[in-house]
Amino acid sequence: MSLHLARFISRRLLYLVPVWLGVSLLAFSLANLAPGDPAELMLVRQTGQSPSAEAVAQLREELGLNGPAPVRYVRWLAKVAAGDLGESYRTGAPVLELLVARFPSTLELALSAMLLAILIALPLGAVAAIRQDSITDHFARLVALIGASVPGFVVGYLLILLFAVTLRLLPVAGSDGWRYLVLPVLTLGIGEAAALVRLTRANMLEVLTEDYVRTARGKGAPSHTVFVRHALRNALNPVITLSAVRFGRLLGGAAIVETIFARPGVGKTVVDAIHDRDYPVIQGFILFAGTVFLLANLLVDVMYPLLDPRVRLSGAERRYRASL
């Protein structure tokens, strides 16, 4: 690893610290601003009756909810730094263990959906740009428009109606094997592919007009070499960035799909937690999803210099080379 690349990565790591603190503050604030008293809700759930004010006050003291919000935030942050996200109000299980146990199912779903989206978007977007205004181009734009316009839950219900109810080819709910993964992946992947198709097509159209592409063509380079080595490679950087951002959204936004298909992932867990006012789980999920999102963006930042050496140059070097 070169010195410039090491400095580049070090700066990105430092930038993560204040952003992560902002995410933690957001997680703590959202959970605490939510309506309802968690202590009262816990007692109602346990006894089935309206609790007395003394019982609510005692439980609030036991849960550490009576102090000022800034003090409670600092205490919570100190516990988080030690790897403790608290215990679920509903089950008493450690939140971190709960999220880690459910995360593989969500990760499997998000990775599969993103892989499907990339496999659809890259060839379709590239071919649409190369054959601009052809039938292939119009087809790709129509697919992208439909995929971006139809909400995911509508796609999910249409897929259930077709493949599970009418054709009886695939199961609707559960997570026991790959057949249970097909419909959720299609539901998420179609929407992601739509966004990536449009971006890939737009970037390819822009890159194909660059001087170095015309030069490669003028030197008699084969068409596939011009498109793949010179055009597609340089058009990929924005696509990679968007893929990482969309992947972070997939991890956090799989809740609806996991609920529709009854998959025991992190998303369904937090939906159940919101229903039960289980604030430690909600806080832990927001912080967990935010951290994963930041790490995904860090991975993109690290990949950028590897794909485009110009990124790893210092500002002085870029100005010097631009002056030549």
Image (cartoon, rainbow, N blue to C red):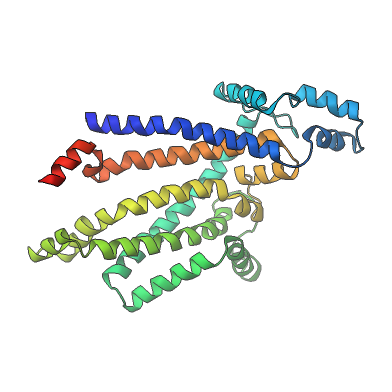
- Of 1 and 26, which appears nearest the observer? 26
Q: How many labels does the image show?
A: 0
Against 292, is 259 above or below? below
Q: Which residue lies furthest to the left in this view?
A: 219
Using the rendered view, name the quadrant where residue 50 is placed: top right
Does residue 253 appear to the left or right of 115 in the view shown?
right
Asked whether residue 307 appears in the rendered view, the answer is yes
Frontmost residue, 134 versus 73: 73
Residue 92 is situated, as x and y percent measured from the top left of the image, at: 73, 29
Q: In this view, does 31 lie above or below 182?
A: above
- Where residue 176 sits: x, y (%)? 61, 48
Asked whether, in this view, residue 39 is left or right of residue 30, the answer is: right
Which residue lies at the image location 18% right of the left edge and 38% below the top edge? Answer: 317
Residue 273 in picture, x, y percent from top left: 70, 41
Residue 304: % across, % down: 30, 43
Depth check: 210 or 271 in front?
210
Above or below, 256 against 24 in this view is below
**Residue at screen point 67% across, 25% down:** 72
**Which of these two is toward me, 200 or 312?**
312
- Residue shown at 52%/31% (left/top)? 21
- The correct choice, above or below, for 252 with respect to 192 in the image is above
Does residue 1 show up? no
Residue 226, quarter of the rendered image: bottom left
Report whether 11 appears left or right of 250.
left
Residue drawn 51% across the image and 46% down it: 108
Which quarter of the picture shows residue 128?
bottom left
- Which quarter shows the N terminus? top left
